[in-house]
Structure formats: C-alpha cells, structure tokens
Amino acid sequence: MSELLDELFLNGEEKMEKAINQLKKEFGSIRSGRANPMILDKVMVDYYGTPTALRQMSQVTVQDGTTLVISPYDKSILKEIEKAIIKAEIGITPNSDGIVLRLAFPPLTEERRKEIAKEVKKLGEEAKVAVRNVRRDMSDELKKLEKSENLPEDIVKDNQDKIQKLTDKYTASVDSTVGEKEKEVLTV
C-alpha cells in the first residue's frame, strides 16, 4: 500500500518538475535585451532538403553580451541559415560577412519590456495550471486507491495534505522563476 502511495508522489513530483523545466525552457527563448543562444533553438535550416536544427550545424557564441555570432561548420550553407533565421521571425535580422552571421540584439524599449513581462506572467500562469492539473490527477488517483485498497480516512487526509504541500512548493517555484525572469526583462 505505501509503495502505491510512494509511486503516486514520485510520479506527481516528476510531472510538476517537468512543468517547471518547460517554463524555464520557454523563458530561454524570450528576448530580454541580452544575447541568448537559446533564442535560436526553434530555428530549422533546410540542409540539403532535410530540416536541421541551426545549433546542430553551427557554433553559436555570445559576443559582448548583445551580439550572437553564428559560425556554420559548412560555410556553403550560410545563405540557407540566414533565410531560416529571417523565416523564424525572432525579430532580429542577421548580418553576414561571408564567413559568419551576426545577430545584434538592440536594446528593448520600455513598452516592449512591459509586453515581454506580461508574456512572462502568462507563461507562469500556464505552468501553475499544469502543476494544479497534476495535483488534481494525484487526488483522483488517491481516491481510486482509497476505494481499491480500503485506505483509512486519516491516511487519505494526510496524503491529501502532502499533495497540497507539494503543489504549494511547485507553485512557489513557478512564482520565483517568473519573478527572476520579470526582473531580468525589466532591468535596463
């Protein structure tokens, strides 16, 4: 019986952790005025007819905090990479010198920073919803266990409290992650 409960909590915590990791991954692709190679994670380049991730076919380095330098391993695909970046609509036009591409991140306006902060909050809310959905699933699973294993009422109540504490912990984690990203976005 306790093995079933342990498994319930292990699975639940794992799913909540995934929600936090997904949030952090999404935050990585949000422009905050600083050059961040993760913004290129979604860029796919047509490499001889095969869509290939940009970061698999080139070295991406941060230069002076506001510029990304993209050095393709195969210099003949520089034009294809340039097209892919423009097509990905990341909001920055690449500059090519024939050998490397440079993406200069312009400073964000106050208005744009506020828009991004709203987007950050929205993503945070979505992560909280995901955490709460896991809580609901865990509670439903606990009710099924209560019926199938004839769990005593006090054990069920204690485990409901544990589920809530776990949810509170991950909700607080979402809040702190959102707060950090918001601060980063709003800092000039």
Image: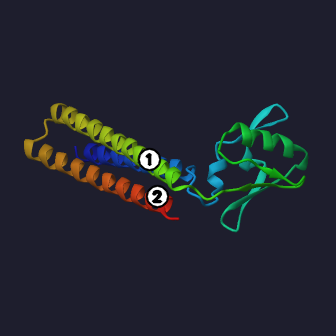
Q: Circle 1 sits in a helix, a strand or a loop, which is it?
A: helix
Inter-mark Cα distance, 2 to 1: 18 Å
Which residue lies under the disc numbered 2? 181
In front here: 55 or 181?
181
At which x and y percent is residue 22?
48, 47
For marks 2 and 1, give the one nearer the viewer. 2
* Residue under the point 83% across and 40% down: 80
Classify residue 41 as left or right of residue 154: right
Amino acid marked by disc 2: Lys
The reply, left or right, for residue 49 in relation to residue 23 is right
Horizontal side, residue 46 vs residue 172: left or right: right
- Across and down, in percent, residue 74 comes to 88, 49
Dot 2 falls on a residue whose secondary structure is helix
Within the image, what quadrant is residue 63 found in? Answer: bottom right
Q: Is residue 60 above or below residue 9?
A: below
Q: Looking at the image, which is closer to me, 11 or 65?
A: 65
Q: Quadrant of residue 37?
A: bottom right
Q: Residue at x 24, y 47 (%)?
A: 163
- Which residue is label 1 attached to? 18
Which is nearer the N-term, disc 2 or disc 1? 1
Which percent across, then down, holds residue 140?
24, 34
For the residue marked with disc 1, what is the amino acid?
Lys
Estimate how packed mark 2 is, as few (under 14), some (14 to 19) or many (20 or more) residues with alpha carbons within 10 Å.
many
Kindly identify the residue that appears in the image at 31 percent across and 56 percent down.
Answer: 172
Question: Looking at the picture, does residue 97 appear above or below residue 45?
Answer: below
Please state if 24 lies on the left or on the right of 127 as rendered. Answer: right
Numbered disc total = 2
* Image location of residue 96, percent across then percent down: 84, 52
